[in-house]
Amino acid sequence: MAMQKGGGEGAAAEMLVGDALLERARALSNRPEDQIARACGYVGPSGRLLKKSFYRALVAAKGYALPESQGGGSGVKGRQAEFRTRVHGNGNLLIGQAYTRRMGLEPGDEFRIELHKETGAIWLSPIETPGT
């Protein structure tokens, strides 16, 4: 198999794999990495370059077996939540949709914020509203 469907719905190009990928990458070896990856079809539907997928495909095309991604499956998961955040310049601390979705939280859910200075922990305790 020389190609696989690239980047989900609406993707204009096919992601090259195997010998086709190696040939195209060699032919473009005098160009920047980003241009090579784009020319090989490693662009998502939003136009974002899929570098990790490109590099993994190159390694696989060279015959090296890569371990499966965490959680098993096909290894095609898109962006993964990273368990890190930082305080923004305006003082806000963003948790992010990946975490609220993972916890089953919905817009409008309310929480009491508890600070535990001795452990450095911040706890969010749900506030029960009448009728829930």
Image: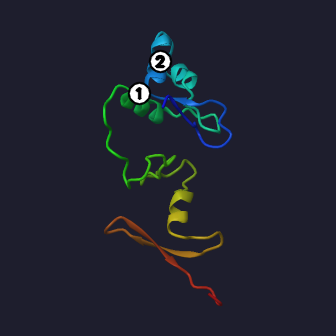
Q: Earlier in the sequence, mark 2 or mark 1?
A: 2
Q: Position of residue 87 (x, y in %)?
A: 49, 52
Callout 2: 10 Å neighbours few (<14), some, many (20+)? many
The answer to whether residue 95 is visible is no
Residue 25 numbered mark, or none = 2
Residue 107 pos. (x, y %) = 65, 69
Q: Residue furthest bottom?
A: 131
- Would you say 95 lies left or right of 13 here? left
For the residue pair 16 and 95, the one nearer the viewer reads as 16
Residue 58's label in the rendered image is: 1
Mark 2 and mark 1 in contact? Answer it, CB < 8 Å: yes
Mark 1 residue element: helix
> Of 1 and 12, which appears nearest the observer?
1
Please give left or right for residue 3 compared with residue 68 in the image. right
Snapshot colouring = rainbow
Horizontal and vertical percent for residue 70?
36, 52
The relative height of residue 70 versus residue 126 in the rendered view (above or below) is: above
Please state which amino acid type lies under the numbered disc 1.
Leu
Residue 75 shows up from this direction: yes
Q: Is residue 63 above or below residue 128?
A: above
How far apart are the alpha carbons under marks 2 and 1? 9 Å
State which quadrant residue 60 falls in.
Answer: top left
Residue type, numbered disc 2: Ala
**Residue name at image x 47 percent, y 18 percent:** 25
Q: Residue at x 52, y 46 (%)?
A: 78
In the displayed structure, would residue 95 be above or below residue 64?
below
Element assignment for label 2: helix
Q: Residue at x 52, y 25 (%)?
A: 37
- Label 1 environment density (alpha carbons within 10 Å; few <14, some 14–19, many ≥20): many
Q: Is residue 21 left or right of residue 9?
A: left
Residue 5, horizontal then vertical, whole percent: 57, 37
